[in-house]
Amino acid sequence: MADYLLGIDNGGSGIKCAVFDTTGSMLSVARKRLPLDQPAPGYTQRDARAVWKANAAAIREAIVESGVLSREIRAVGLTGYGNGMLLVDHSGRPVSPCIVSTDARAADQCRKFAESGAQRRIFPRTLQTLWAAQPAALIPWFRDNQKEALDRSATYLGIKDWIRLCLTGTMATEITEASSTCLFNLKERGFDAEIFRELGIEEYFGLAPACVESTGISGYVTEAAAAETGLCAGIPVSGGYFDIDANALASGILNDSLLCLIAGTWSINQYLSKTANEDYDLNRNTTTLSYLPEHYLIEDSSATSASNFDWFVSHLMGTAGPGDTRSDLYQACDATISAMDPEASDVVFVPYLYDSSAVSGGRGAFFNLNGSHTRDQLLLAVYEGVVFSTAMHVSRLKPQKAFTSARLSGGVAHSPVWSQMMADVLDLPIEIPMGTELAAKGAAMGAGVACGAFIDLAQAVENMYATERIYRPQAERTAIYRKKYETYCKAIEALRVFHR
């Protein structure tokens, strides 16, 4: 009987459930989208029961479409957006909605912790600074605004941990997500009462969930969950991963010489390291524990990627022709850029329409415009600006370390033109992993280790990872882009005039 693995990915915008064989081939994928509830400015959340129902439907659909018998699925792996939070009571019933990782209701708590020095004091333990959607900020927000919800709660969970609870009845998180909550001691690998005390929430230390290893078995599918999903009762469910870890694992990243780039709505840039910065004043990146034992995952990210391109296409490119799809329009853009000489335009685009990666509060901008410039030259600047933003992130990650190559996934990776530009700007070979739904695949790989299909993650990568294509830097283009990147950096500095 063949072995198959199920990976479930709960992202910020949708749910994906995919069935893989142990060679990495995806047999099926089911996708479900749930609208965000935004009851007040800065709130992004979803009804917890609706999230589970959508997951159950996606699991059932993926199994049916794969043609695989339920009894042939050896294990289930989980992943999802990190942080956000769901409160559950002692019976496992939701006390709050599923707060999504884009939620900003607790921004004032973050500001207060920075101003009071609490953030600095906990840094040697957390190796990270606070942001609004972390439990470290959301718990004090609930204490100040909805204390009765905290008082009714048994624990707080991440999004994938809620799916674990629904599948297995187990209330637990896992090591990669726990390490990103700013409540976790990364050196001691556990939730830390001293951190809770410094944040003034020591009375809620008991809400910290049990923490399992990512490739450990966290529970088994219950009879009730089997009836809803079509899975067989008793199938093991692994600990799982924060989605940035799942993507990196599925990209075959197993050492610190490989750079992992995820360029979709967000520009996510990361690498593995055995060491991490412990000096608050030198902090530049986000540090969490990784999927690989004794390694940190060092990340530098912002919403400065293809979402800027989508804005340009939607507002300035018009509509596709009769019968044309959005994909046809993207291909037309690629064809336009492929035919252009990068030296023919000096327009600079700063891709800060939705987020700023270098200037706090910075906004998007075109620089050097004059009356002779065309829409195509603006489009070229958008392509380049997104890649230059990635280059700036990479320089912040490891400025003194030369990577041997980068592995690129996300929407940008679907564009040969953009992928080649990434190779030219970074002066690195760009490898595109085979397949799609990498986060779900990474979750499935971890599940394969948990159930014994693989000895370890190295064997999982050996069996399930493959490179689809490679883009190598072109020396003449690299020289051109080095100069253009210097101009881009000057444009970033110019933004500071508006945000002093």
Image (spheres, rainbow, N blue to C red):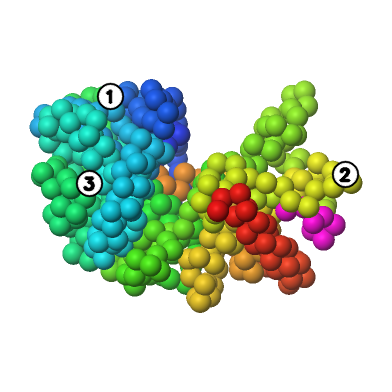
Q: Residue at x 28, y 53 (%)?
A: 116
Residue 235 visible to an observer of this rendering = no
Quadrant (top left/top right/bottom left/bottom right) for the N terminus: top left
**Residue visible at 64% across and 69% down?**
427
Instruction: From the viewer's side, name the closer residue of 262 and 436.
Output: 262
Residue at left offset 22%, top offset 34%: 144
Report the residue that reaches farthest toward the front.
500
User: Relative to 58, does residue 306 appear above or below in the rendering?
Assistant: below
* Marked residue nearer the N-terminal end (2 or 1): 1
Find residue 371 and name its label. Answer: 2
Residue 171: x and y, percent?
16, 40
**Percent position (x, y) of residue 448?**
30, 52
Give the magenta part as a residue range. 341-348
User: How many numbered marks are there?
Assistant: 3
Residue 359 horizontal/vertical position (percent): 54, 54
Depth-wise, is mark 2 or mark 1 nearer the camera?
2
In this rendering, is residue 110 above or below 488?
above
Q: Nearer the viewer, mark 3 or mark 2?
A: 2
The mark nearer the N terminus, 3 or 2, is 3
How many angstroms separate mark 3 from mark 2 (CA)? 56 Å
Image quadrant where residue 213 sits: bottom left
Please name the residue that numbered disc 3 is placed on: 173
Type of amino acid at the residue the image marks with label 3: Thr
Mark 1 residue type = Arg
Residue 88 drawn at (x, y percent)? 18, 32
What's the residue at 22%, 66% (across, down)?
A: 187
| 202 w.r.t. 151: above or below | below
Name the residue beneath numbered marker 1.
49
Examine the structure image and report whether residue 383 is included in the region drawn in magenta: no
Cβ atoms at labels 3 and 2 below 8 Å apart: no
- Magenta residue check for 345: yes
Say which of 353 and 280 sits in front. Answer: 280
